[in-house]
Image (cartoon, rainbow, N blue to C red):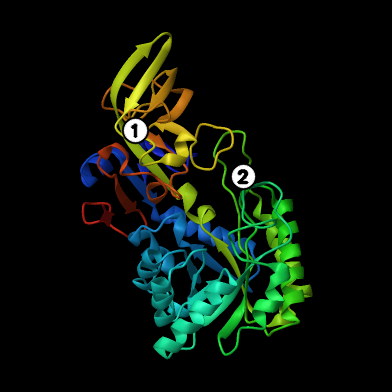
């Protein structure tokens, strides 16, 4: 019997990813723990975003959310561009079919070696400081290449409702808006394309995102009076729900707001306008699967001890960006028996290794699989995998046109 009300439906009581039961996936990848991503869910999310946004808006993927090579290769055929934040991410992006001129490189603290790689590759370097501008010019002169650049702007506003603020006030990100005119005057013969303004992330409030987009467009138009603009990155910040109390983001008002901005203001720039999303595109398409290795009782609490933990999925432990810890959604992937209240903990020797605190789950015994949802973004590569020397988890991309047998793509 199949339950199709979940993004990962159950077949005969067992959770599936891309049509493959998780116990079969565990056998196929060689054990637990592992991350599994559903190719169809990735494609459907991109399609939903495109349907909601005006056709004039380009869609870029923030590679930091999930840089698994198989995911990047799939996304290179789905989105219009990539944004990277390190030379390592840059190399992975360049290994896909994404053209170099649709890859942007943002982030503070780019080393000179990284700037060399970016300029040589022909990607857009999003400058975060006046000092970075000086260094990228020197790199271009050394290589005999005219660097392709944009300015990342730290706006004079912040975004209400964001889980993490990346704009307004003093920031390591971007050039303060009031300093931009002076930096523009120093561009010289650099191949300048435009501006990137990203003020906040993980926002579930459509009204707040719309307000930020309007303020961003006003700022960009003001700066465009100083220099021709061919590229405008409006950032993203679209959030996903991580607990039952979170309401899913409504894309409708955001699309309507962007359509108005395109018609009334942005069209006059004749620029490529980009929305850059990471978590929103991949976060809900992945799960983290770990196996129960012990079941114990301690002073009225039943603990399920699993072979995974915060060293693989730091965010689910509440130690990555949560101001107040809340349980990620999780389930017993191989059982639908009577519900009990348990606490799910990892295998690390620290009380911080908490994956589910007093959660109601189907009864699980040693050998059962626990699946943690919303694991498609900021999972493996955002976690301290070397902590206490446990093995790294595997990753697998399943579903879509790929076979569901052992020939499907697996990455370790």
Q: Is residue 18 visible?
A: no
Residue 229 or residue 204, whichever sits in front? 229
Label 1, label 2: how many angstroms apart (C-alpha)? 29 Å
* Pointer 1 local density, CA inside 10 Å: few below 14, some 14–19, many at least 20: some
Q: Is residue 285 visible?
A: yes
Residue 352, image x and y in percent? 43, 30
Residue 317 or residue 273, whichever sits in front? 317
Vertical position of residue 309 compared to residue 229: above or below = above
SS at mark 1 in the image: loop
Residue at the spot 33% in from the left edge and 15% down from the top edge:
296
SS at mark 2 in the image: loop
Q: Residue furthest right?
A: 264
Q: Earlier in the sequence, mark 1 or mark 2?
A: 1
Q: Nearer the viewer, mark 1 or mark 2?
A: 2
- Which of the 4 quarters of the picture holds residue 76? bottom left
Residue at the spot 38% in from the left edge and 74% down from the top edge:
97
Residue 109 or residue 289, whichever sits in front? 109
Vertical position of residue 35 compared to residue 117: above or below = above
* Pointer 2 local density, CA inside 10 Å: few below 14, some 14–19, many at least 20: some
Horizontal side, residue 83 vs residue 271: left or right: left
Horizontal side, residue 293 vs residue 58: left or right: left
Residue 220, image x and y in percent? 71, 72
Residue 280, image x and y in percent? 54, 53
Vertical position of residue 378 compared to residue 244: above or below = below
User: Which circle marks residue 12 in the picture?
Assistant: 1
Horizontal side, residue 292 vs residue 169: left or right: left
User: Which circle marks residue 248 in the picture?
Assistant: 2
User: Which circle marks residue 339 in the picture?
Assistant: none
Q: Quadrant of the N terminus?
A: top left
């Amino acid at each position: 019997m199949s339950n199709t009300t979940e993004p990962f439906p159950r077949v005969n009581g067992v959770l599936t990813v891309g049509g493959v039961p998780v116990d079969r996936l565990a056998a196929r990848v060689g054990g637990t723990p592992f991350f599994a991503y559903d190719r169809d869910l990735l494609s459907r999310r991109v399609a939903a975003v495109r349907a909601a946004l005006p056709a004039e808006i380009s869609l870029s993927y923030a590679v930091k959310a999930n840089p698994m090579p198989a995911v990047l290769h799939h996304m290179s055929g789905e989105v219009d561009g990539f944004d990277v934040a390190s030379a390592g991410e840059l190399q992975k992006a360049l290994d896909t079919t994404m053209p170099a001129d649709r890859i942007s490189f943002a982030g503070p603290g780019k080393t000179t070696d990284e700037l060399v790689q970016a300029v040589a590759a022909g990607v857009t370097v999003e400058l975060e400081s006046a000092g970075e501008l000086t260094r990228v010019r020197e790199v271009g002169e050394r290589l005999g290449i005219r660097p392709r650049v944009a300015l990342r702007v730290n706006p004079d506003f912040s975004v209400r409702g964001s889980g993490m603020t990346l704009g307004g006030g003093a920031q390591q990100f971007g050039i303060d808006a009031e300093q931009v005119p002076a930096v523009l005057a120093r561009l010289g013969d650099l191949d300048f394309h435009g501006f990137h303004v990203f003020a906040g992330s993980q926002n579930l409030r459509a009204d707040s995102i719309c307000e930020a987009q309007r303020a961003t467009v006003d700022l960009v138009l003001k700066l465009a009076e100083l220099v021709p603009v061919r590229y405008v990155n409006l950032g993203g910040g679209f959030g996903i729900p991580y607990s039952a109390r979170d309401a899913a983001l409504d894309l409708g008002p955001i699309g309507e707001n962007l359509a108005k901005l395109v018609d009334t203001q942005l069209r006059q720039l004749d620029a490529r306008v980009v929305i850059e999303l990471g978590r929103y595109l991949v976060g809900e398409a992945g799960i983290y699967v770990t196996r129960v290795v012990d079941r114990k009782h301690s002073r009225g609490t039943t603990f399920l001890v699993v072979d995974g933990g915060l060293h693989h999925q730091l965010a689910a432990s509440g130690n990555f960006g949560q101001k107040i810890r809340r349980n990620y959604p999780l389930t017993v992937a191989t059982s639908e028996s009577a519900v009990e209240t348990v606490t799910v903990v990892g295998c690390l020797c620290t009380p911080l290794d908490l994956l589910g605190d007093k959660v109601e789950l189907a009864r699980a015994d040693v050998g059962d699989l626990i699946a943690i949802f919303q694991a498609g973004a900021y999972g493996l590569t955002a976690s301290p995998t070397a902590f206490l020397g446990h093995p790294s988890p595997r990753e697998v991309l399943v579903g879509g046109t790929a076979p569901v047998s052992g020939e499907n793509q697996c990455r370790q």
